[in-house]
Amino acid sequence: MSKKFYQLTRLGRIAQLAAHKVLSPIDTAFFANHTGLTQERAGQLVENQLTTFALPEGIARNLLVNGHLHQVPMVTEEPSVIAAASNGARLAIQGGGFMVTQPRRLLTGQIVLTEVADVAALSAKITKLKTTLLQVADAAHPSLKRRGGGAKWLNVRELSAHDLSVDLTVDVQQAMGANMLNTMLEAVGAYLQQELAVTVLMSILSNYAPDSIVTATVEIPFSALKTTDFAGNVVAAKIAAASRIAQLDPYRAVTHNKGIMNGVSAAVLAFGNDSRAIESGAHAYAVKDGQYRGLSQWQVVADGLSGELTLPLPIGFVGGATKLLPAVLPNQRLADVHSAEELMQVICALGLAQNLAALKALVTTGIQQGHMALQAKSLAVNAGARPEEVPALVNALQQATTLDLVTAQQLLVQLRK
Ligand code: NDP
């Protein structure tokens, strides 16, 4: 029988992706030979650069999004994340895959005004200037408007009796938009200072991005969920119960969402985006009604389990570090994504796949069974196994009653005998 994708060697996997035309010859050579960032490029990215810091990249296999299959690159140091994402994707395929909405992509930033004597009066004055302020914003980064984007609307919010936030919302097209928006905000801030003698405390985008949201849904038939110990409808009911608990209890909700972000952040990194921006925005969205809750919800429907995840994903397909990190363009081609909108859809579906696999494991076998099988690999390496010794040691560890470093070291000594 032919080997499964995960059983192949690294080069075997790359060869299979090439044989299936997922990778072009150029990208095949790239993935086979890539050794990471050059020191020179790293020095162009950050300050006081000393060296580079490598992380593993793998792929979540066969994520079916709106009828289109994607092989999704993921960058993470955590064992079992990529396996779980692939597992979630496999389950989803049995229900026809993920359906994902057409995303909204608008970014908002704020010019914070302080020491305001009369907030209502100033607010009215600024509102009157709205059209001019939108023009000032567009003039600060005119290429955005030429591309069909640019400043869309401006609102004034009273933060206190003496503080105002002037919120500018911009269509950032294919970029994440932080730098472009900050330029526009500073221009509007300077204009307000000059025209209305206001005190500008700061001008900066907000990483809270409720206008850059996307929703993924999926329906998994009971038949896909059954395990050796539980019928599919029982697993579905348990997943729905786990989802309910994540709506009720912030202790559980944070971990529920961390599981979603295992997939989201790994993909965000693989596509050269700012993972802190996405993380902070997602967690803020999780508390949008005043209580921190699970970002996804699952419920039992007629003959299966239905899941939904809505996420703010203000990510960029161009700009930022996307051109400077050499793996990003090959990763975009590997995933077969061609726009920021499509990338948002794929990442949102990946988050839901990740969540599904984690919840299924949690409510059936428990998380440790699968996790520790993969953890055995890092234990083997930590115990000092040479690459050719790792498979045998992992095997021995999986038979052992205790999975810890001492056991790994003892088993390694025995193996070497
Ligand atoms: P850039 O400053 O790189 O701006 C986007 C670039 O993409 C522009 O040069 C633009 O060209 C170019 N571009 C080409 N094609 C398009 C297109 N179709 N649509 C839009 N732009 C296009 O990046 P961003 O403004 O996206 O900012 C992202 C960076 O900002 C990230 O590195 C992020 O980490 C960082 N950042 C994040 C902050 C936060 O999250 N709080 C704060 C500050 C920075 P042109 O100039 O011709 O328009």
Image (cartoon, rainbow, N blue to C red):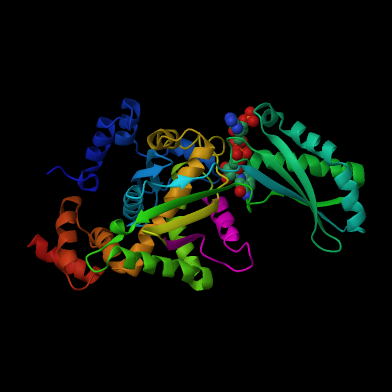
Rendered location of residue 167, percent (x, y): 75, 49
Tell me where the magenta segment starts and ends, as one range: 275-300
Query: Magenta segment: does it hold 117?
Result: no
Residue positioned most to the front: 302
> In this rendering, is residue 60 above or below 356?
above
Image-based side of 146 in relation to 315, left or right:
right
Rendered location of residue 218, percent (x, y): 42, 52
Q: Which corner quadrant holds the C terminus?
A: bottom left
Rendered location of residue 148, percent (x, y): 66, 29
Nearer-the-camera pick, 276 or 306: 306
Image-based side of 376 in relation to 111, left or right:
left
For image coordinates 43% across by 54% down, the residue present is 352
Nearer-the-camera pick, 347 or 378: 347
Q: Which corner quadrant holds the N terminus?
A: top left
Residue positioned most to the left: 417
Q: Quadrant of ligand 1?
A: top right
Image-based side of 267 in relation to 317, left or right:
left
Image-based side of 207 in relation to 100, left or right:
right
